Image: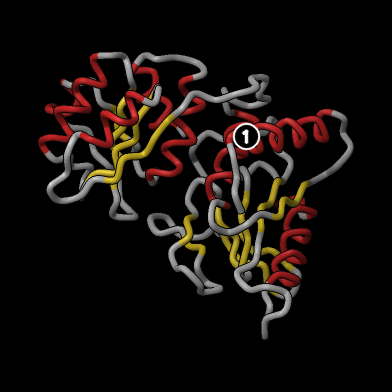
Amino acid sequence: SHMTDGLMLKLARRINELFAADAVDGIVVTHGTDTLEETAYFLNLTVKSSRPVVVTGSMRPSTAISADGPLNLYNAVVLAADKRSRGRGVLVTLNEVIHSARYVTKTNTTSADTFRSPDLGCLGYVLDGTPYFYQSVTKRHTASSEFAAVTYTSLPRVDIIYGHANGSRALVDAAVAAGSKGIIIAGAGNGGIFPKEKEALIDAAKKGIIVVRASRTGSGVVTQSREYDSYGFATSNNLNPQKARILLMLALTETTQRKEIQRMFDEY
């Protein structure tokens, strides 16, 4: 439940080793649900194979009435074993629903139906041991990802700042002082930034720190803006702040050029 950058890198390397050795046809990863979507998206960008990787978890403990873990695990194995799962990127399944790691997010604190894909919907369902697919992902992932087959042993520090009314520059300045190489600003609405926070982010950008505008709303595309573009800020497209952080960390291993980073957010 307490995932770290180091653990994600170790997991991606292990999955790539198994696929490179032709040891498995598919892989299931069990994971705590709180940060499941972040690990799934990280694997979606770093696993160099079209073979299925399926991430699952459970919202109820095994001692609970109607524990969901056993069925989720069974469905994940069924999904990973199905040839139709190939080439779709990393998949997430809980509660009999198939999600793309790119789209899915946790939306409820306790519900078994917490994992949803707000903007674009689920990919399909696993019912009575059979997967049913209805759509695919058009964004780059896994075998076509430029970040696949990771060789680096650490990731640049990227922090998330949550925008709110009466926002100040204190947290931005603290992130800069702590050594952030990138900052995701979870802005209001369409990535809106409050004046004092904006001043601090402009100062950060002048120091070479990459700033990416995301949204705290939970869905929708953060569109580009002449004003924010003039400051050198990028946008997260429709990635939520936590997934934008994952992509920016990987992007910063390749480049610090704002245009290149924006390309990555548009393609992935």
The one of 253 and 266 positioned closer to us in this rendering: 253
Q: Is residue 198 above or below residue 111?
A: above
Please report the residue visible at 32 percent of the width from the left and 24 percent of the height from the top: 176
Relative side of 79 to 171, left or right: right
* Percent of width and height locating residue 143: 65, 30
* Percent of width and height locating residue 30: 71, 55
Count neighbours of disc 1 (C-alpha within 10 A) and say few if under 14, some if 14 to 19, many if 20 or more.
many
* Percent of width and height locating residue 254: 50, 16
The one of 49 and 67 positioned closer to us in this rendering: 67
Which residue corresponds to mark 1? 142
The one of 233 and 157 positioned closer to us in this rendering: 157
Q: Quadrant of residue 193?
A: top left
**Element type where label 1 sits in the image:** helix
* Percent of width and height locating residue 55: 66, 53
Q: Quadrant of residue 177?
A: top left
Please report the residue visible at 50 percent of the width from the left and 72 percent of the height from the top: 110
Q: Is residue 8 above or below residue 230?
A: below
Please report the residue visible at 80 percent of the width from the left and 30 percent of the height from the top: 17
Q: Amino acid at mark 1?
A: Thr
Q: Is residue 112 above or below residue 233?
A: below
